[in-house]
Image: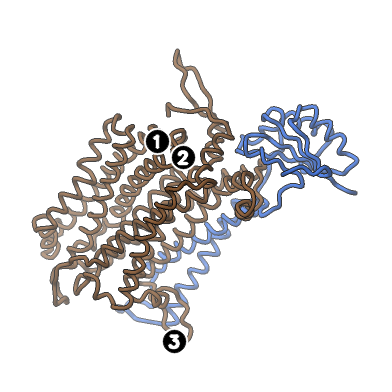
Amino acid sequence: MARRTIMGVYTEANGAASAIEGLQKAGFAGHEYEVLTGAPYPEGAFGEPHSKHRLYFFPIIGACCGFAVALLLTSATQIAYPMVQGGKPILSVPPMLVIMYEGTMLGAILFTVLGIIFESRLPASLPAVYDRRISEGYVGVVVTAPEERLGRAIDALKQANPDVIHDERVRSPR
Amino acid sequence: MRERKVLSDSLINDELLRFPLHTPTWFWFAAGFLGLFILAFISAIGIMVVFGLGVTGLNKPVMWGWMITNFVFWVGISHAGVMISAILRLSQAEWRRPVTRAAEVLTVFSLATAALFPLIHTGRPWRAILWVFPYDFARGIWPSVRSPLIWDPSAIFTYLTGSTLFVYVALLPDLAVARDRTTGWRHAFYSALALGFRGTPRQWKLQTIAGILLSALILPVFVSVHSIVSWDFAVALVPVWHGTVFAPYFVIGAVHSGVSAVATMMAVLRWVFRLENYITPDHFDALGRLLVTVGTAWLYFFFLDVVFALFSQEAEEVIVMQQRLFEWPWNFLTVMLLVTAYVIPVPLWLSRRVRRSITAMFFTSLLVNVGMWTERYWIIVPGLMKKYDFSYSWDQFTPSLIEITLVVGSFAIVFFGLLLFAKIFPIIPIFEQKEGQIFAEEIEVGRARVPAVIRE
């Protein structure tokens, strides 16, 4: 079943919120539409469903990996080249802690950044229809749905008085 | 915050992308001017590599001079950037909006510059890899993790990587704006970097969480880095170096010089890029208040360090402290660093008029960093100049032209980095400004109307 993308562009957040309400009434599910804005709005400002994420797992996994690598590195290098200093044990724990701490934090940071990119669904291509004015304060409502249901989506978008409706089939400048 | 200007999204885009998308003539002159100093910096390294460290003022026993002083100074400057940004993000301080990115970028460039100095100080920088990274499977010789000179690179690498990624993640939405307003190769460049960011509620939500989460992760790293830099000194047996107070003393000194550097930089940004709508006297007022607290805490640790040295009543400690306080030129430097880093600026910052004067804040914050550079020199060199057990020589330290060039060149590298960044990317976060406009509200308190911020 062919799917097509359309986008209603609104000058104000209220218009976009009305469009989303219309789409929900017309039976469109959350994954069939999305709101595009040039700035962060409070979650749920457009009546969109709250999105769930697992970002908080990433730093924990990263920290564990970083700790393990640093532990391996510090202990293995000391065992590989055993050098007795001042009659102390070969494995010197306090300095190992310094490097293990840095390794843990580095792992946590790297995985957090990976997590942010992954959970943001990036890298991604722009939608089939896009309007550059979104970065100037306009709000876009993108609907991707089977062709036969798009008529209802266009009606819902039109009822909220859009500035323009872009259609994937009618290519307009992005 | 009493001042809030109502700005449209397109005006914010226009003003904050003006410099990245249009090149004024002065940019080429500024880049060329700074480029000359960078060329001199590279030449100085070349001379040092060809002729050896003998071309510097280093000698036996003063083996750490201006290069290590400069290293500590730039690591210190790098601290305020992310600290300010992280604390302001975590506390959701409204005045963070125009400050964060410039502070983070200052961190990246000053830290990268700082990292150069221990490398070139080795005299054979390409060999540093043998001393730092555990890779030498053939010889079976590994770096000793007991050495603070191994802790340093691990801490700096973590901090530099973390800070750079922090800048990049927060830059994603602005790269998308730049992508939407450009054509040709610029469009391709910004598109590639923006990774297809399009501003869905999910992406914005993660962007907000990312700022807080990365701040929380970077703050402990920030504290560890300058603590570890201080241990380069504190774990040595050189008198006046091996103090238990060194770690917090270095960290607070770093914050003092770094926050001052941010104030200086904000003034320059406002003047050069005409950012009056974004960087207001309110921001300098807030920075000034912060500096009064930080400066006073630094003074407390400064005296604590002196008292700790004298309290031990060890002959070596007393001799070096006597030299610092009563012998020329160290007595002059003691007075100079106290006057420039505290006595002049901090009492002035108690005045609201001074805090809100951008010119006054520029000069007073600049003065702090004159004092803080001197303080690092004052900490490092005198302790090395005396004869102790197991050291059989003593000498004075006079910087050579090579070291002077390297220090001046390091400033040029940081300024050039900041200029180049501002030329390519918006130096003030565009999306944060827009968010500030969305969340802005005016409320009535009695008969007064005051600006307020809506919070989730």
* Residue at x-position 68% and y-position 43%: A51
Contact, mark 2 vs mark 1 (Cβ under 8 Å): yes
**Mark 2 belongs to which subunit?**
B
Q: Which kind of residue does numbered mark 1 sit on?
A: His
Chain the render paints brown? B
How busy is the neighbourhood of tag 1: few (under 14 within 10 Å), some, or many (20 plus)?
many
Q: Which residue is mark 3?
A: B139
Tag 3's secondary structure? Answer: loop
* Residue at x-position 40% and y-position 56%: B32
Res A44 seen here:
yes
Among the two numbered marks 3 and 2 on one chain, the one whose residue lies closer to the N terminus: 2
Looking at the rendered image, the disc whose residue lies closer to the viewer, 3 or 2, is 2
How busy is the neighbourhood of tag 2: few (under 14 within 10 Å), some, or many (20 plus)?
many
In depth, the one of B203 and B266 nearer the eye is: B266
Contact, mark 1 vs mark 3 (Cβ under 8 Å): no
Q: Is residue A75 left or right of residue B176?
A: left
Q: Residue furthest bottom?
A: B139
The quarter holding residue B353 reads top left
Q: Is residue B344 left or right of residue B5?
A: left
Looking at the rendered image, the disc whose residue lies closer to the viewer, 1 or 3, is 1
| C-alpha span from label 3 to label 2 | 52 Å
- Residue A155 spot, x, y in % from top left: 84, 31
Q: Which kind of residue does numbered mark 2 sit on?
A: Pro
* Residue at x-position 53% and y-position 30%: B7
Q: Where is the N terminus of chain B found, in terms of image quarters?
A: top left
* Residue at x-position 26% and y-position 33%: B350
* Rendered view: B100 above or below B73: above
Res B234 seen here:
no
Q: Which residue is mark 2?
A: B98
How busy is the neighbourhood of tag 3: few (under 14 within 10 Å), some, or many (20 plus)?
few
**Mark 1 belongs to which subunit?**
B
- Residue B266 spot, x, y in % from top left: 39, 42
